[in-house]
Image: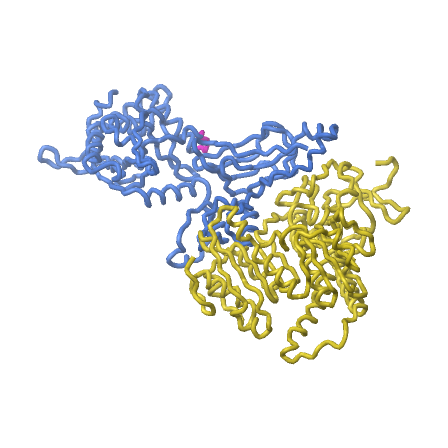
């Protein structure tokens, strides 16, 4: 601390107003804490401004076109021209603005003080916030939550140039569909962008360094993703030479994971050690008695809904509640062709944990709703622990999978068994029936597919 | 800042858990070394635990009435000494990013099958889900299971009929322990009870004489001391009564020492302090020891060592005009002898009905270990000792 600096005492200080930080702020305020949030960019973080929200906006836009084209043989009129991307961008920006304003309204209504600027630690209980070029403010906190999120990782062989080679977020802002696009990456972000632009008319190559898409998903979903991407018109090049491919594309998007935003925080000044990769926190999300970390700076999948749950838990703990981040099931949703979603253990993970598992797999080709929508590529694959029969994993490919996965997350959290799922009435005709049917397959008594040999 | 986690020590032999009777400090209090922190109620006695460290108490991991397992963290102190060291030593401070052991809440056990709301309840009640047996399909843990664990009551089916409304008093401490022990006893032990009416004329006279002698010296002679003496001598010739059943290993454990528990009514409930090695004590020692352990129990001051290791129990209801009755054995013991009030009764002597002081006695034994002949043999030996007390070696 520089002698003479004025500092403001604050109760809870939250660094970052992304999906983790703003939720933590609201919950802590709800429980009576006085909360100050520091945000250097826009409220809502990457998720709301340039990640989840705009990317799903683009995916939905592209999927609508694909749906119309798929129904053309059933009489749906053909498109008369290419989509108007400028108009799309306006609607995308408006949607984001509405949601950002919503967060601002919530924070204001909760009495949360929002400070705009870049924060860094200057002591064990003190943070310096640089506001613009000139102004600096100091805050002495009782408790601090590090919720600074993450930024796009970069590939050495394809560095971002801010124009032709960009990170995924920039690809959501284009006013035009590029004639040709190289997407480098094998994760869901790369896949979503590749599928969306292919559907919108770009000649897309999806190039991966590894030998499969969605490498950390169940292998059946990787296979479904590959088939689906090709169906959408994406050329998939596995184990590819990225540098060689990049020269041929008008634009290049690189998706190489997320890197935590920790380097600017001067953790040393707070007595914290910079982690090798990500922070390890306890169930209360503490690094220390008065220091918490949530979201993409902590170990685990860099997903907004994980950060939001952690935010709620951190807020609970700050509010003196017996909170713990102990979710068994964190769903993953890919807005691709087909939609892919997963929650819980994969077959391989269950085996690695020594869990004796049994499967229930139901193909969408046997489902009325899928047939009438001409979307029969996909399946529901459920994994049950033989001991007790509780569902421990769900791997879904097909329309609305990203919604259906919620039922399976609940099932896993509740310890639902195959019987529970099979005996729950699912509305007809819906894709959700696939989950009930998959449970019946596991129980060896399916109605709509041939009875497989009992496993 | 150093965290000192105080774990519940084993305050009785093989004691698995204890209940927080009363916190003597609150979170945020500064405490000194050896300051009494908490009063714990074990199944047998109440024990005050002191702090081995000075500092500020920052966490209490169980509420009053909560049950804490031996070895589990009871409270956390931010200790003084190392706090100062940290402020002065930046290197030490840098280690703070290491995650604190999530000791407070171990409910996150991966294999535990419990819905989120149940996990939350467990956190709030301080229940470790790893130790909860789920009653649902596949061992799924319900809110009821957690509540049951939290109160320590045994898993029981729903009552056959709804209880009438009334004031509710939480089952705790000695009373709770009695409920558990007696239910276990009734559930697992095939009890057999033999009833006997003893001619207690000489025994009563001996007891009265010993009391007068003791009182003339300013001492006391508890009647129970003579009963303990008789039982201890009888057990010498019937060693099977001085045994216990190790069900797990399918073995009978024959004990060396005769440790006689003396059932004692206290304001908290029934407590059974133990007279250890009763067969080795002189009569004077026995009188002093019976007096000491029963007085301590009545005053709630019995030490844990006074309350453990019993190999048989006697229950004398004479002071309350008790008659003949059955008893429940205290597992893992295999027998219990109950005595009633000595009263004049009409008995037949030499063909004539005469009035004699008669003491009712019932011998209850575990029929898994002791057969009817053995049971009767012990009772007759005991009867002989009491009816002809010169055999008591006094």
Residue B298 within the magenta-colored segment of the rendering: no
The quarter of the rendered structure image containing the N terminus of chain A is top right
Residue most extreme to the right: A134
Q: Which chain is yellow?
A: A
Direction from residue B272 to residue A129 in the image, left or right: right
* Res. B168 in view: no
Residue B51 falls in which quadrant of the image?
top right
Q: Could you say where residue B103 lies in the image, as x and y percent from the top left?
A: 58, 39
Please name whichever residue, A136 or B235, is drawn nearer the observer in this view of the structure.
A136
Please name whichever residue, B70 or B130, is drawn nearer the observer in this view of the structure.
B130
Above or below residue B16? Residue A107 is below
* Res. B368 in view: yes
Q: Which residues are magenta?
A: B299-303
Residue B300 within the magenta-colored segment of the rendering: yes
Above or below residue A195? Residue B326 is above
Direction from residue B171 to residue B257 in the image, left or right: left
Direction from residue B219 to residue B132 in the image, left or right: right
Q: Which chain is blue?
A: B
Residue B324 falls in which quadrant of the image?
top left
């Amino acid at each position: 601390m520089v002698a003479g600096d004025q500092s403001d005492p604050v109760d809870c200080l939250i660094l970052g107003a992304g999906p983790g930080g703003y939720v933590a702020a609201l919950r802590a305020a709800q429980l009576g804490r006085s909360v100050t949030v520091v945000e250097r960019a826009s409220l809502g973080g990457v998720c709301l401004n340039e990640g989840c929200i705009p990317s799903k906006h683009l995916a939905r836009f592209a999927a609508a076109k694909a749906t119309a084209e798929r129904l053309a043989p059933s009489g749906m009129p053909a498109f008369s021209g290419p989509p108007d991307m400028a108009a799309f961008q306006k609607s995308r920006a408006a949607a984001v603005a509405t949601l950002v304003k919503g967060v601002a309204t919530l924070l204001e209504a909760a009495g949360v003080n929002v400070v705009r600027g870049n924060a860094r630690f200057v002591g064990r209980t003190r943070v310096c916030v640089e506001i613009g070029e000139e102004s600096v403010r100091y805050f002495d906190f009782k408790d601090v939550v590090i919720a600074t999120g993450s930024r796009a990782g970069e590939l050495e062989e394809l560095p971002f140039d801010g124009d032709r080679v960009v990170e995924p977020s920039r690809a959501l802002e284009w006013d035009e569909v590029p004639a040709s696009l190289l997407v480098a990456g094998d994760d869901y972000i790369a896949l979503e962008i590749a599928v969306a632009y292919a559907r919108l008319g770009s000649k897309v190559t999806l190039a991966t360094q590894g030998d499969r898409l969605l490498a950390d998903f169940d292998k059946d979903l990787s296979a479904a993703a590959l088939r689906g991407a090709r169906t959408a018109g994406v050329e998939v090049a596995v184990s590819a030479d990225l540098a060689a491919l990049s020269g041929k594309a008008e634009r290049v998007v690189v998706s190489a994971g997320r890197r935590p935003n920790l380097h600017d925080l001067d953790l040393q000044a707070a007595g914290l050690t910079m982690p090798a990769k990500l922070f390890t926190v306890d169930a209360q999300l503490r690094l220390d008695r008065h220091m918490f970390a949530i979201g993409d700076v902590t170990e685990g999948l860099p997903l907004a809904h994980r950060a939001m749950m952690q935010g709620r838990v951190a807020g609970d703990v700050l509010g003196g509640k017996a909170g713990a981040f102990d979710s068994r099931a964190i769903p993953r949703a890919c807005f691709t062709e087909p939609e892919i979603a997963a929650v819980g253990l994969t077959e391989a993970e269950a085996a690695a944990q020594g869990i004796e598992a049994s499967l229930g797999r139901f193909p969408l080709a046997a489902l009325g709703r899928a047939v009438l929508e001409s979307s029969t590529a996909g399946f529901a694959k459920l994994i049950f622990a033989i001991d007790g029969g509780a569902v421990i994993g769900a791997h879904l490919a097909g329309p609305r999978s990203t919604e259906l996965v919620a039922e399976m997350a609940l099932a896993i959290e509740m310890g639902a068994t195959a019987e529970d799922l099979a005996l729950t009435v699912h509305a007809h005709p819906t894709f959700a029936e696939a989950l009930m049917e998959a449970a019946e397959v596991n129980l060896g008594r399916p109605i709509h597919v041939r009875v497989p040999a009992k496993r | 800042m150093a965290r000192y986690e105080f774990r519940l020590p084993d305050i009785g032999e093989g004691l698995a858990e204890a209940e927080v009777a009363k916190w003597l400090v609150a979170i945020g209090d500064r405490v000194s070394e050896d300051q009494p922190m908490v009063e714990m109620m074990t199944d047998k006695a109440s024990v005050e635990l002191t702090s081995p460290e000075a500092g500020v108490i920052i966490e209490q991991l169980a509420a009053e009435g909560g049950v804490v397992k031996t070895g589990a963290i009871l409270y956390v102190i931010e200790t003084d000494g190392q706090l100062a060291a940290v402020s002065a030593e930046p290197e030490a401070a840098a280690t703070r990013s290491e995650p604190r052991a999530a000791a407070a809440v171990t409910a996150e056990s991966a294999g535990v099958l419990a819905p989120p709301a149940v996990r939350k309840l467990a956190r709030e009640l301080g229940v470790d889900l790893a130790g909860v047996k789920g009653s649902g399909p596949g061992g799924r843990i319900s809110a009821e299971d957690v509540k049951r664990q939290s109160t320590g009551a045994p898993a029981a089916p729903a009552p056959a009929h709804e209880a009438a409304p009334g004031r509710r008093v939480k089952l705790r401490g000695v009373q709770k322990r009695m409920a558990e022990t007696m239910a276990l006893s009734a559930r697992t032990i095939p009890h057999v009870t033999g009833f006997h009416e003893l001619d207690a004329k000489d025994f009563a006279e001996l007891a009265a004489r010993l009391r007068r002698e003791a009182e003339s010296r300013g001492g006391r002679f508890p009647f129970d001391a003579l009963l303990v003496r008789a039982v201890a001598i009888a057990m010498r010739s019937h060693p099977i009564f001085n045994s216990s059943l190790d069900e797990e290993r399918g073995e009978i454990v024959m004990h060396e020492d005769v440790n006689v528990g003396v059932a004692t009514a206290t304001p908290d409930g029934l407590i059974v302090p133990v007279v250890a090695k009763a067969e080795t004590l002189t009569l004077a020692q026995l009188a002093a020891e019976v007096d000491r352990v029963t007085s301590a129990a009545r005053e709630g001051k019995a030490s844990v060592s006074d309350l453990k290791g019993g190999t048989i129990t006697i229950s004398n209801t004479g002071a309350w005009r008790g008659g003949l009755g059955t008893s429940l054995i205290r597992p893992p013991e295999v027998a219990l002898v109950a005595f009633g009030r000595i009263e004049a009764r009409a008995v037949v002597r030499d063909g004539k009905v005469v009035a004699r002081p008669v003491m009712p006695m019932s011998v209850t034994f575990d029929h898994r270990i002791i057969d009817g002949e053995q049971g009767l043999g012990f009772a007759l030996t005991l009867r002989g000792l009491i009816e002809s007390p010169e055999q008591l070696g006094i």
